[in-house]
Amino acid sequence: MAICEQTEDPAAARKRGGKSVVEREVVRVITAGTLTEETLLESRRNNYLAACAEAGAAFGVAWLDVSTGAFHTQPAALADLEAILARLEPGEFLVPEPVLQRPHLFETLARWRERLTPLPAARFDSANARRRLHAVFGVETMDAFGAFDRAEIAAAGALVDYVASTQKGKLPRIMRPRRLARGAVMEIDAATRRNLELTCTLAGERRGSLVGVIDRTVTGAGARLLAARLTAPLTDVDAIDRRLDMVRFFVEAARTRDAVRGLLRRCPDMERALSRLTLGRGGPRDLAAVRDGLALTAELRSALAAVGLSGRPPGIEALVADLGAHTTLVERLGRALAPDLPHFARDGQFIAAGYLPELDEQRRLRDDARKLIAALQARYAAETGLQVLKIRHNNVLGYFVEVPAKQAPRMPSGPDGPFRHRQTMANASRYSTVELSELETRIARAGDTALAMEMELFDDLVSEASGRAEQIALAAASIAALDVAAALAHLAVDARYCRPVVDDTEDFCVTGGRHPLVEAALAQGDDPAFIANDCALADGRRLWLITGPNMAGKSTFLRQNAIVAVMAQMGSYVPAEAARIGIVDRLFSRIGAADELARGRSTFMVEMVETAAILHKAGPRSFVIFDEIGRGTATFDGLSIAWAVVEHLHAVNRCRALFATHYHELTALAAKLEHVACHTMRVKEWQDDVVFLHEVVPGTADRSYGIHVGRLAGLPEAVVARAEQVLATLETGEQSSAITRLADDLPLFAAAAAARSSPAGPSAAAPPQLQPSPLEAELRAIDIDALTPRAALDLLYRWRDAL
């Protein structure tokens, strides 16, 4: 969508002739990735404009949030593109046209086709991009910002060029690009993000996702930073510890935490307000947001100073320093801006009274003249004796005197009269006077002069704020980081989370771990408390085979440990009694069942594609969770695949893994593979019923209890009874002969009779012995080929009457 505005003064157009049209131009092209309007953006999430580029054998990605100025680049491989897009979730993605022709990228890009913007390859030329970036940042080289390769420069330059072209030459404040080095963050593929519901649920909603459960931030900038950290957990132990130290500070200093959060609740979104101002799209309320946000920095410093320097970790010290001192700008904006501010500067009335005497004088002239209009109307009414006389205004005639048509003959409007006739309407007549015309000129001149003075002051205030953009942005980033640290501390205290120990080992030990989403859902109802479980992938046992029935909690256990790893490395306390996490560089999951019919993939094919990706990419520092591999095909095929996957994870990938399965035969691998340990979900049988204890213990399961789960789901009792009979036959006999006997004896009529006569519910009596009915016996004895149509019809009528 394009926005077209008037770019010429109407007075200049009139000088060209009476029929001249005021010039208009397209001043902005609106795209999904270049939005800055507060009403069009979600305050708690970034809106990235991303681009990818190739240069030589390298591939790079860059992304920019136009609404905040945050600018990043990352070297990557084409195979990493899907994971990067899943992490960023860009509002718009710029792609060179040649990249669109890569066959192996068709499926990846197809998922984002609604957000793709193809551009000619020339727009991604690295030499032009480098010159463009030098001009934007006023430097001769980009080396001071990082060791960017040609592909990253090409992608970053294409972003800046695209923003400049859509904004018609106006660039927002863009922060210096920050380079995300390879391996700097935990790599999480799209399927794993979806399965763990990191930022949205499987239904696509933020509420109920991990970020929705743990987000206790009170500012929009803090919420965006929290989501960014959650989607890109760190792999540097020292950086993680610095974040955890800040959380610990607020955990231990409860009074300071409450004071800081109370102040932050009053903090507006300075990042986005500053971006709009520097882009020439801001208004008086954006200036007020900058003023109010900067005013809070002094109060935040005071609240944090109460703890004393000795009690503050280095991270908090750095944030306090970054808050800066902004007394001069805050004082000026405080004096300049009025209490009630309009949305747009062109509406006027946003400069406070007393700030500029000349402006106050013009306002008095304007306002007094308006009072004179009312006084003049009263005098004219008295002089003419017409109390119905009114002074009105429109954009064509300006100010005029109006009386009803019936009273027009009484108006002194002759050649010598004070009133000059202007217009006759069906129900009224309109007049003007010399005195009224002079007053109108005075009012217009005073109003225009006052508005022009306000616009000049607005530009001056915006210029001063833009001149301090770096300090303001630094203070805004510090406020966001304080909000995240205090919010995570509040979460830790409220939800009983512990500080994890993150180190460079390959261990993964969690004591009393819990799933934050399930625990939060249980807390909202009358359900029992969440059952915590331990997970110790250490001492050579880095691969757990987990067996047990459905509904016992296997999938929850797998997910909760993956979530603990993500939360620990983002710098958060974790839902456990204790945790020691060796750095995870890549996180993979294969959970759930879903087909992709539009792409021609069955459920099993999707499962195999995701499994293949894991086996190709996982390494010794990876963490993998598998849930029921091989269930989408024949039993022996599925068992064979699962068996081979376990062996490959153990011998080739050598990663930490949790492998849940219903193939109990796999537990035999524990005796063969030294790093495999068997665990199971505890189940208690009581009075022909089964109780799921949701506890993970060493050992193996001997049954799957699938029929019991079917009964809980509401299967008809006849189906449950028949399933139990089939299971007993299969378990006691040689399988192929047992299946043949079952196929030869299909007691459908008896099963229906049993369903009518048996009580419903899990406590029903044992299924009766199924005997052939008289109807079935008669059916077996009939020679169908010898029946005439009439005889067959009579037989059917008789059977129906018997039923």
Image: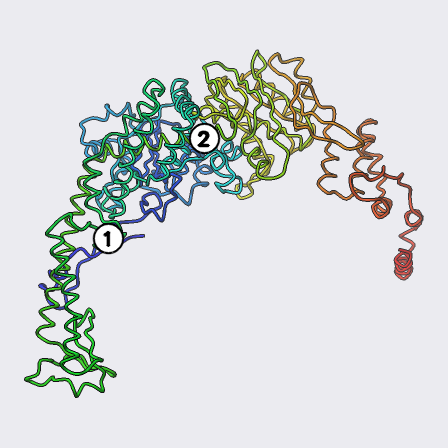
User: 36 left or right of 372?
Assistant: right
Residue appearing at x 19%, y 34% in the figure: 135
**Which residue carries the number 2 mark?**
490
User: 554 left or right of 712?
Assistant: left
User: 51 left or right of 646?
Assistant: left
**Which residue carries the number 1 mark?**
26
Residue appearing at x 21%, y 80% in the figure: 387
Along the viewing direction, whichever of 329 and 374 lies nearer the viewer: 374
Q: CA distance from mark 2 to mark 1?
A: 49 Å
Along the viewing direction, whichever of 257 and 420 lies nearer the viewer: 257
Q: Nearer the viewer, mark 2 or mark 1?
A: 2
Q: Is residue 97 visible?
A: no
Q: Quadrant of the C terminus?
A: bottom right
| Residue 304, image x, y percentages | 33, 27
Per the rendering, the mark at residue 627 is none
Q: Quadrant of residue 667?
A: top right
- Mark 1: amino acid: Val
- Mark 2: amino acid: His
Q: Is residue 482 visible?
A: yes
| Residue 134, image x, y percentages | 20, 31
